[in-house]
Amino acid sequence: MRELFSYRNRKLKLAGLLILKRALMLSLFLVVGAAQTAFAGITVTPTTWNVIGLDSNNVNSGPDTFQAGARVCNTGGAAITNVIGDFIWDSTNSFINLSGASTLTVSSLNAGACVDLYYPVVVTRSASAYNATRRYHVSVRADGLSSVSTPMPRELYVEKIISQNRNSVTSISGPTTVYVGQTYTYTVNASTATQGYEQLEAFLNLPNIIFQVLSISTTYSSPAGATNDKFYADACGWDNNPLSGTYRSCIGPANYSGGKAGGTVSTTYTVKILSTGTTTASA
């Protein structure tokens, strides 16, 4: 009788250990799943040049609106929702202002995916605007994640633009009538001096209230076969930290062979229409 009781007792103990082992395995699985969620995150980096400007001879000639952009990437293993990017001024200057929305929202961003946010900045057409600066950053947040920001301090600097006949926008192509919710492409063809430049922007000004830029694809003839997923080519490795002793100069490393990009330039924008309105898309 004692042996039978002992045997049954051992069976109960073994069964209890087996149940406990399964419970531990389940607990471990739940902890690992929680850890994957905890490692979700976002990064945000600038995608445009810090130099903007007005024509050096006539402030009423040439461009006065420039795109300030940042790239948001989902570095986690799962999609994130309600991605919000805020353009925030860190100083004041009446000559440099936004001309569109300061807050942009992306409903969701898949794991490993990136999206660009663009904010049009307008320079007041006044000679007093030359050499003006205004500091800013872009702060991004999403559901369940802490906010992150582009590097600080950073600023926009109003340079004197020197017009040259060898630089030109040769064509802009794309639909003139579009519909809310649909996706379209626009292409800007431009040219520079044969070898290009250490810093180059050839872009289409799209109001961020009407257009959401989904992607950009750029090709250059110099260096041969060069491409870009932005309209800004930081060919030489630019120092845009206003606290640096080499601010607004090339410090490397070069991002394109020879430290220059340009020649024949073709940029294709894929955009989504966000709202109704009438606008002129200038390059």
Image (cartoon, rainbow, N blue to C red):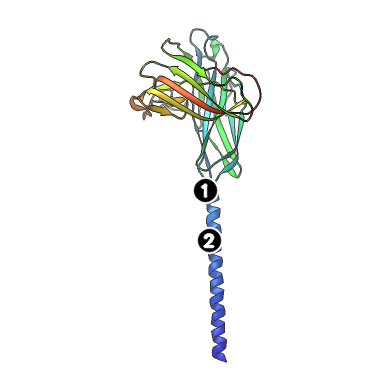
What is the spatial separation of the Cα atoms under label 2 and label 1, in whole angstroms? 17 Å
Which of the 4 image quadrants contains residue 198? top left
Q: Is residue 49 visible?
A: no
The answer to the question of whether label 2 and label 1 lie on touching residues, with beta carbons closer than 8 A, is no
Q: Nearer the viewer, residue 92 or 54?
A: 54
Q: What residue is drawn where x is 57% and y is 92%?
A: 1
The crowding category of the residue bearing disc 2, from other C-alpha atoms within 10 Å (few below 14, some 14 to 19, many at least 20), is few
* Residue kind at label 2, given as amino acid type: Leu
Q: Is residue 131 positioned above or below 35 on the image?
A: above
Q: Is residue 121 positioned above or below 215 on the image?
A: above
Q: Secondary structure at mark 1?
A: loop
Nearer-N-terminus badge (2/1): 2
Q: Secondary structure at mark 2?
A: helix
Residue 179 is situated, as x and y percent measured from the top left of the image, at: 63, 26
Which of the 4 image quadrants contains residue 98? top right
Which of the 4 image quadrants contains residue 31? bottom right
* Residue kind at label 1, given as amino acid type: Phe
State the residue position of label 1.
Answer: 39
Residue 175 is situated, as x and y percent measured from the top left of the image, at: 57, 21
Q: Is residue 207 visible?
A: yes
Q: Nearer the viewer, residue 182 or 18?
A: 182
On the picture, is 244 further left or further right than 173? Answer: left
Residue 256 is situated, as x and y percent measured from the top left of the image, at: 37, 27
State the residue position of label 2.
Answer: 28
Q: Is residue 63 positioned above or below 31 on the image?
A: above
Q: Nearer the viewer, residue 260 or 50?
A: 260
On the picture, is 133 further left or further right than 278? Answer: left
Q: What residue is drawn where x is 47% and y is 13%?
A: 161
